[in-house]
Image: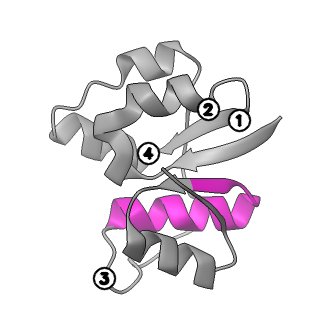
Amino acid sequence: MEYAVISPNLFKRLDEIVEKFKGKYSLIITTSGLSFALKEGIDVDKALDEGVKVLAYSHKFQPLEGLSVEETEAVLLAKDLNYYLITADDKVKEFAEKEGVKVIVF
């Protein structure tokens, strides 16, 4: 099975993402993405119960120009591990593609 990192810009639609992609991809959210979700009051419990994993980008990094720390971590994790990135944001898509990341637009 292939892996896909869920971009934080889609966290409010996390249930939809999990429903559409479970079984096709092993789904990942990042540690800073999880922190973002908790700060924003976005419930991720159901997604975690459905098997979404939480991974950290293990290198020190600076946010990519114009992207938040959370979005940058998602892009860099997908790049380093050769995972797909699921996003709905054009700017994130553009940065990801420049970094050589395979992008799924939702």
> Which class describes the residues within 10 Å of circle 4: few (<14), some (14-19), or many (20+)?
some
Q: Amino acid at mark 1?
A: Tyr
Mark 4: secondary structure: helix
Q: Mark 2 and mark 1 in contact? Answer it, CB < 8 Å.
A: yes
| Distance in Å between CA atoms under marks 3 and 1 | 28 Å
| Distance in Å between CA atoms under marks 4 and 2 | 20 Å
Q: Amino acid at mark 4?
A: Thr
Residue span colored magenta: 69-85
Residue highlighted by disc 4: 31
Residue highlighted by disc 2: 21
Left or right relative to 58: residue 43: left
Mark 1: secondary structure: strand
Mark 3: secondary structure: loop
Nearest the camera: 27 or 17? 17
Sequence-wise, the earlier of marks 3 and 1 is 1
The image quarter containing residue 25 is top right
User: Residue at position x 27%, y 39% from top?
Assistant: 37
In the rendered image, the vertical position of residue 28 relative to residue 85, given as above or below? above
Residue highlighted by disc 3: 66
Between circles 4 and 2, the one closer to the viewer is 2
| Distance in Å between CA atoms under marks 1 and 4 | 19 Å
In the rendered image, the vertical position of residue 38 relative to residue 49, given as above or below? below
Nearest the camera: 99 or 39? 99
Q: Position of residue 63 (x, y in %)?
A: 38, 77
Q: Amino acid at mark 3?
A: Gly
Q: Amino acid at mark 2?
A: Phe
Between circles 2 and 3, the one closer to the viewer is 2
Left or right relative to 43: residue 17: right
Q: Position of residue 60 (x, y in %)?
A: 50, 71
Q: Position of residue 3 (x, y in %)?
A: 72, 43
Residue 25 got which mark? 1
Mark 2: secondary structure: helix
